[in-house]
Amino acid sequence: MTQNPQKPEQIQTELNYSIIKKWLIKNPEYFDELCTLITEYFPPRFNSDNNIVDIQQLVLHRMRNEINRQQSRETQLLDAAKDNTLSQSRIHKAVLSVLGISSLEEFLSLISQDLPNLLNVKTVLLSLDGKVKVPKGEDRIILQSTVTWPQKFFQNDAKDINSCACLKLTYGIERKNAVLLLGASDPEAFHPGQGTELLAFFADVLEISLSRWMLKKP
């Protein structure tokens, strides 16, 4: 059997539909404008019969929900990107400061006095004597949103520490162990599941610098 050829009107309609569909996929923000236009130019029609569903209102409701979800996702992605950029900038400034020191005394002073401001944390503590016991495991960077470190290590700032990061370090020819603690007032500053690549990079720089100055220690 031969198929009935499509009429020019049908071909044109299908072509227009394809073009419109592709354009809408590339321009999802149009739905936001469309929702506003529908609300403005086609006000909802109400019917006293409770058995009649207002399709227009139902469609608008679904469209608004989808737009809100999309805007929420976009906001979350933008916030995450901003936070990541800010964290990267802070780590880079801290690294440059560490690389710019010229003595062990400057290194220790940088850790306790300058790093808190550079990294936007409440306190920074470096333990070289092994008194800070860290959880066992292969994780080099440990993040805690619920601080379990003994408060004595944070001294007077203990009551203000709501999240912290622990950087396990090794230094010197003998590969001695050290620990750097970053204590933050913001409970969301450090938390499990957060990316640790930047902190791991910072730990590498600290190990190199610490090894260098400990070897030159008289």
Image: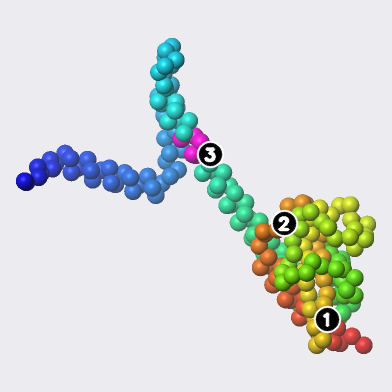
The tag earlier along the polypeptide, 2 or 3, is: 3
Residue 185, percent from left and from top: 81, 53
Q: Mark 3: which secondary structure?
A: helix
The tag earlier along the polypeptide, 3 or 1, is: 3
Q: Mark 1: which secondary structure?
A: strand
Around disc 3, counting alpha carbons within 10 Å, would you say few (fewer than 14), some (14 to 19), or many (20 or more)? few
Q: Is residue 46 visible?
A: yes
In this view, the residue in front, 95 or 199, is 199
Residue 5 quadrant: top left
Which residues are the magenta region? 63-67
Does 64 lie within the magenta span? yes
- Name the residue carrying label 3: 68
Q: Amino acid at mark 3?
A: Asn
Q: Which mark is residue 191?
A: 2
- Name the residue carrying label 1: 176
The tag earlier along the polypeptide, 2 or 1, is: 1
16, above or below 181, in the image: above
